[in-house]
């Protein structure tokens, strides 16, 4: 009962107010219209219980009971008399009428008489009904009364926030709320269905609506539940076993009781909500359910309905003697394997018992089933199926080898994946085919995994050319993105950018239905764009692929997609989206359990979460940051894999951030080697930057110079890491006290980080530049940098950066107080306020000033208010006059 009243707090408050007024002799009338399942009856029950506890007399009636009684007029008169008897005895009364719509035309005028009672005695009248079924006469009475006697309090759908008490923390909560349209009863039915596969008690109220239906109407509603989608009358008649006139009569009755409603499609009808169908379907006897599905399958086949529409019924009423049933299941699986791999797997699993040894479609069914398992993330099951197929005999074109290679790669068995792809390509009779292109793409991945970038590029180029000849635009995009990485790491970044741009064009032009056939293409493109510094494009392509995978159930790429997406979001400074994405990664790892986890993905995700929490810096984030770092290190263990080395390097950087440069340097050199030989040469600028910063903190200028020189000598491609080399130079020059050069390097690094959208790195660089400028006494440039970092900190949601800005502003203000500018000694304005005042006097708008000074419009407005107060001027015009007067007064005299 409590669940049913979730989100009805407002109704309970106005009911309590009405009860309180009874003590003063005042009555009230309230109408409670609402959809079936919105909680009307529960609200009346609570009202009656509350009234009885307060000593208020209760008269309760139900529209259905009154309408079905032998004498409707006498029943109505009895209700009114009972109310009047209580009031005559001096007792306050609550009268409730539930299901008022079942009262029919209300020829006895019950509604009007009860409303009249509330005007002359302490009577609270509650009327609950469904608007769609309310007869014209009581509807008119209520409409007239709403002008004065009646308070209308509809039970609207629950908002997502209100429904949270019913939905809990489940990951599919938003989808259930949307599908249930905020209806409490439907929410409970759909939750029960997804949790247990049965509606159980959640659908009891819906099934109660079937009581009293005649046999024809009951047969019709059961047939509608089996069909599960909008239907024409003729189809329902066939499935229900009724002739068409009987079906029409049944549907008329079901429409009157609001179980059936017109559908959006033409003359079709439908159950009022899917939850109604689920509640009815669950209680069908197995034999009846089977018979209804068999009739539906036969009727749809006669009508030439699409395969997808017939398959649900065929799968639930299979006839081993009917070859059409097997053909239907296989055809449906072909069509659904990418759009809904879990559904395709169900169809194929149902088809397996119908396949005899040597059946023409046996091989195809097993390959499709393995592919569906792969796409659904059931890698072990898919691998077992494919291993059995390959053991049984030679592979066929488009058969088991390609999918076997893909599964091995997803399981992290890269050498096995490459070996399978090579054997598959060698066995192909036709090397210019879609299968050949896909195998070359697999070999490109295998070569990339062992850092043979030249071979990776060659296989990728071959795959792209074959895919283009066969019109496979998504496959071509996949191979082009692989090719881009091969070019990037063989020193040709210009070609890499061209290839990636072309791949992006192909992916962006592909409709969702086509992109679904190869979501790995979007993942590959996103990874490539991330390495090329195209972070916004990377985020866009990965977010689209992740949404498609979530919508269709293609979960096999989730770990990689979400981890790479979170990395892009973190580099862009989108801390809250980063943490939200990582929450989805964590849920996925929980669902997979300890035997289905992927240590590299989990460790990288933990690292990213630690970084995001560090920069966010809300209460409790410091402890969580340490816990995530510990988790990442535990997963990495003593592995020498590149991902494990990266985890330990990022740990060293975080140690530096938290104020221990000596330990940070030690950890980093222990991981990467004294000469950084343990990491790829192109990655070295990233960690040289960290080592140079640590050297500055330790006062070791020679060490800072050493790491800056190594960073400068590293390969210039990919250029995305050049900003780190520039910043390493910044630390080194600062360590030598060469602040002018350090500031030049800082500006160059900030420009490069800005070009790629790496907001956190921009802020780190500008804050360091602020420190050096203050040390050099160059305070005039600092305010603008701090304003820019403040704005970026707000965009990123970083309390840590905001705190640093505040610290430096305080330091800057102290310097300004200690050494005032002689030219403005008489001015009460700060340097920033003078700058803004001057721009206002030149006629610039607040928006233009904000753009010029890298401020928010709100910050400019705040400064202006301070300026007006200090100069005692009311507006912009007066400010301009005051400044002009000051300029004239200070102008030197001329002869």
Image (cartoon, helix red, strand yellow):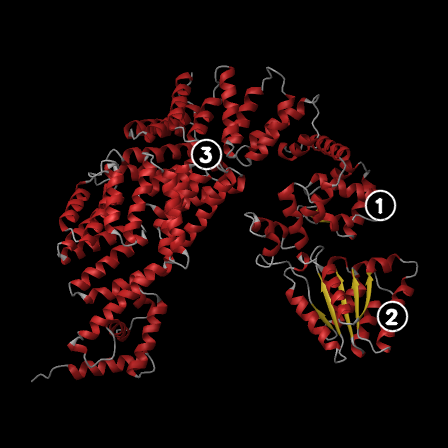
Residue most extreme to the left: 895
Question: Which part of the image, by quadrant, shows the N terminus?
Answer: bottom right
Quadrant location of residue 227?
A: top right
Q: How far apart are marks 2 and 3 (CA)?
A: 72 Å
Quadrant location of residue 442?
A: top left
Which residue corresponds to mark 3?
518
Which residue corresponds to mark 2?
82
Quadrant location of residue 30?
A: bottom right
Asked if the residue under mark 1 is in contact with the one under mark 2, i.e. CB atoms within 8 Å, the reply is no
Query: What label sits on residue 176 in the rendered view?
Result: none
Q: Where is residue 197 in the image (x, y as percent from the top left)?
A: 65, 40
Task: Name the residue: 71% across, 30% down.
Answer: 317
Can you tell which of label 2 and label 1 is closer to the viewer? 2
Relative to residue 359, is residue 288 depicted above or below? Answer: below
Q: Position of residue 383 (x, y in %)?
A: 49, 26
Question: Which part of the image, by quadrant, shows the C terminus?
Answer: bottom left
Q: Is residue 792 visible?
A: no
Between 445 and 631, the one nearer to me in the picture: 631
Query: What label sits on residue 214 in the rendered view?
Result: 1
């Amino acid at each position: 009962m409590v669940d049913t009243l979730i989100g009805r707090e407002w109704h309970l408050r106005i009911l309590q107010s009405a009860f309180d007024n009874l003590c003063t002799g005042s009555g009230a009338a309230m109408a409670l219209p609402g959809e079936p399942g919105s909680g009307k009856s529960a609200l009346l029950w609570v009202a009656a219980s509350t009234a009885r506890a307060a000593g208020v007399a209760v008269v309760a009636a139900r529209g259905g009971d009154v309408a079905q009684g032998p004498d409707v007029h006498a029943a109505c008169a009895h209700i009114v008399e009972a109310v009047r008897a209580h009031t005559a005895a001096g007792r306050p009364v609550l009268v409730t009428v539930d299901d008022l719509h079942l009262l029919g035309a209300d020829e006895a005028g019950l509604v009007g008489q009860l409303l009249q009672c509330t005007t002359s005695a302490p009577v609270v009248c509650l009327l609950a009904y469904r608007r769609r079924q309310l007869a014209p006469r009581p509807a008119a009475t209520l409409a007239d009364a709403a002008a004065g006697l009646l308070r209308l309090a509809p039970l609207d759908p629950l908002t997502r926030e209100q429904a949270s008490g019913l939905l809990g923390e489940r990951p599919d909560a938003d989808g259930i709320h949307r599908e249930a349209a905020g209806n409490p009863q439907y929410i409970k039915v759909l939750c029960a269905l997804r949790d247990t596969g049965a509606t159980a008690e959640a659908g009891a109220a819906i099934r109660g609506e079937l009581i009293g239906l005649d046999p024809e109407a009951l047969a019709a509603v059961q047939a509608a539940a089996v069909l599960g989608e909008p239907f024409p009358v003729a189809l329902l008649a066939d499935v229900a076993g009724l002739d068409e006139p009987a079906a029409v009569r049944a549907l008329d009755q079901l429409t009157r009781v609001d179980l059936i409603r017109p559908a959006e499609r033409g003359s079709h009808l439908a159950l009022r909500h899917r939850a109604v169908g689920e509640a009815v379907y669950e209680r069908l006897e197995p034999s009846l359910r089977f018979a209804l599905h068999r009739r539906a399958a036969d009727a749809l086949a006669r009508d030439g309905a699409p395969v997808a529409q017939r398959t649900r019924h065929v799968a639930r009423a299979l006839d081993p003697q009917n070859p059409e049933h097997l053909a239907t299941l296989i055809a449906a699986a072909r069509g659904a394997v990418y759009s809904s791999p879990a559904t395709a797997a169900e169809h194929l699993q149902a088809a397996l018992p119908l396949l005899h040894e040597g059946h023409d479609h046996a091989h195809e069914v097993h390959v499709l089933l393995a592919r569906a398992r792969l796409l659904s993330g059931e890698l072990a099951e898919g691998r077992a199926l494919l291993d059995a197929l390959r053991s049984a005999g030679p592979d066929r074109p488009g058969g088991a080898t390609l999918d076997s290679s893909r599964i091995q790669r997803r399981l992290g068995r890269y050498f096995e994946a490459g070996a399978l792809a090579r054997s598959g390509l060698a066995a192909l009779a036709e090397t210019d085919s879609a299968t050949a292109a896909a195998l070359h793409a697999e070999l490109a991945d295998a070569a990339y995994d062992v850092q043979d970038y030249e071979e990776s590029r060659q296989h990728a180029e071959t795959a792209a050319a074959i895919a283009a000849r066969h019109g496979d635009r998504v496959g071509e995009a996949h191979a082009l993105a692989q090719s881009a990485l091969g070019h990037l790491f063989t020193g040709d970044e210009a070609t890499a950018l061209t290839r990636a741009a072309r791949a992006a064009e192909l992916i962006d032009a592909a409709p969702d239905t086509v992109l679904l056939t190869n979501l790995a293409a979007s993942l590959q493109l996103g990874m490539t764009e991330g390495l090329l510094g195209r972070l916004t494009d990377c985020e866009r392509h990965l977010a689209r692929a992740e949404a498609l995978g979530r919508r269709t159930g293609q979960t096999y790429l989730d770990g990689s997609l979400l981890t790479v997406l979170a990395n892009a979001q973190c580099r862009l400074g989108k801390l809250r989206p980063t943490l939200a994405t990582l929450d989805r990664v964590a849920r996925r790892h929980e669902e997979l359990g300890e035997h289905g986890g992927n240590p590299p993905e989990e460790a990288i995700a933990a690292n990213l979460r630690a970084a995001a929490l560090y920069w966010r810096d809300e209460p409790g984030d410091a402890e969580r940051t340490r816990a995530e770092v510990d988790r990442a290190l535990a997963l990495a263990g003593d592995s020498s894999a590149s991902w494990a080395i990266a985890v330990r390097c990022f740990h060293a950087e975080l140690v530096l951030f938290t104020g221990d440069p000596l330990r940070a340097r030690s950890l980093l050199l222990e991981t990467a080697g004294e000469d950084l030989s343990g990491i790829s040469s192109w990655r070295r600028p990233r960690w040289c930057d960290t080592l140079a910063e640590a050297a500055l903190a330790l006062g070791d200028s020679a060490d800072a110079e050493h790491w800056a020189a190594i960073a400068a000598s590293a390969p210039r491609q990919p250029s995305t890491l050049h900003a780190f080399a520039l910043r390493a130079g910044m630390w080194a020059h600062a360590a030598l006290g060469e602040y002018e050069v350090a500031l030049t390097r800082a500006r160059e690094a900030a420009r490069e980080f800005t070009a790629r959208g790496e907001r956190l790195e921009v802020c780190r660089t500008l804050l360091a530049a602020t420190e050096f400028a203050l040390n050099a006494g160059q305070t005039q440039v600092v305010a603008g940098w701090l304003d820019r970092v403040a704005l970026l900190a707000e965009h990123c949601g970083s309390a840590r950066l905001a705190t640093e800005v505040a610290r430096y502003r305080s330091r800057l203000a102290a310097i300004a107080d200690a050494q005032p500018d002689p030219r403005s000694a008489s001015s009460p304005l700060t340097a920033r306020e003078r700058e803004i005042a001057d721009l206002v006097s030149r006629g610039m708008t607040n928006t233009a000033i904000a753009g010029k000074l890298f401020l928010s419009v709100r910050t400019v407005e705040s400064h202006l208010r301070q300026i007006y107060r200090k100069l005692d001027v009311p507006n912009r015009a007066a400010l301009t006059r005051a400044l002009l007067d000051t300029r004239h007064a200070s102008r030197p005299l001329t002869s």
